[in-house]
Amino acid sequence: SMGLLDELKQQADAVSQAQANDADRARDIAQRADAALQKVYAYLDAFGKQLAVIKPPSSRVFPLTGVGRFENLVLADFFADYRKKLVDDKEYLDYVHFQYQYASPKVFEVVKDTITQKEQVEQYLWEANLRFSVDEFRNERGRVTGGKFKIPGTVGAVIRADSQADRPDIVFTLRNVERFETLKLSYATEAVDDALMEELAKLILARPNQFCARGTVLL
């Protein structure tokens, strides 16, 4: 019969093997994600630099309840960046961050005469991630009764591509790209290539594209 020490050694070996397998898997996922994210960064960095020179007009319109339509916009202020992470003392790309603006010189002036309307517009503006200033109206007792908003007509868009620690997928988060909303889409690392990046570029340029159709929408 097996002695206690032998039994414990067998258990310890099994645990060590499982840990080694986990470490191998984590390293494999990190390597594959890194290769995909290198492509994402290289493409978006070059794309942004070209568009910064061209400054193309955008056909997109962003309606916002209680404020108006953000339109006659120009693509501008592109910026691509990335962050790294350590897996087993080795550096891998963790995520890529890309931002730009749908720019306009227009400034919306919106007056709301009730506290409810004022708070509702503030809520919409926060959710849309828009800059604004507000002059509050107060009654003789000093209570806020409404306000006059000034809202620059420029929409900030952000695209982020994140590696996943537990699976070989890249998750793209798109904020204010097509409308005032945040969309999350997952793609297998192998599917994240220059062809997919071209579909994303078409999406940014408001051209027909397959970017969202090729991903899995995450709620």
Image (spheres, rainbow, N blue to C red):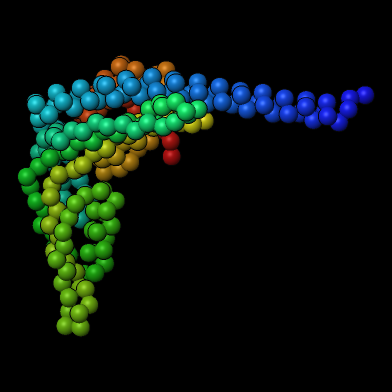
Q: Residue placed at 16% from the left, 83% from the top? A: 140
Q: Residue placed at 16% from the left, 59% from the top? A: 133
Rendered view: 129 above or below 85: below
Camera sees residue 167: no
In front of the other: 162 or 131: 162
Where does the N terminus fall, quadrant-wise?
top right
In front of the other: 171 or 92: 92
Residue 119: where, in percent of width, then height? 26, 63
Q: How many marks?
A: 0
In front of the other: 23 or 156: 23
Camera sees residue 153: yes
Q: Residue placed at 29% from the left, 25% from the top? A: 41
Rendered view: 138 above or below 34: below
Rendered view: 193 above or below 183: above
Q: Residue placed at 49% from the left, 31% from the top? A: 165
- Looking at the image, residue 153 sits to the left or right of residue 42; the answer is left
- Looking at the image, residue 208 sits to the left or right of residue 38; the answer is left
Where does the C terminus fall, quadrant-wise?
top left
Residue 105: where, in percent of width, then height? 6, 45
- Looking at the image, residue 82 sits to the left or right of residue 92; the answer is left
Which residue is the extreme one toward the left?
105
Residue 15: where, in percent of width, then height? 69, 29
- Looking at the image, residue 10 sits to the left or right of residue 45; the answer is right
Q: Place residue 52 in its image quadrant.
A: top left
Which residue is the extreme one toward the right?
1
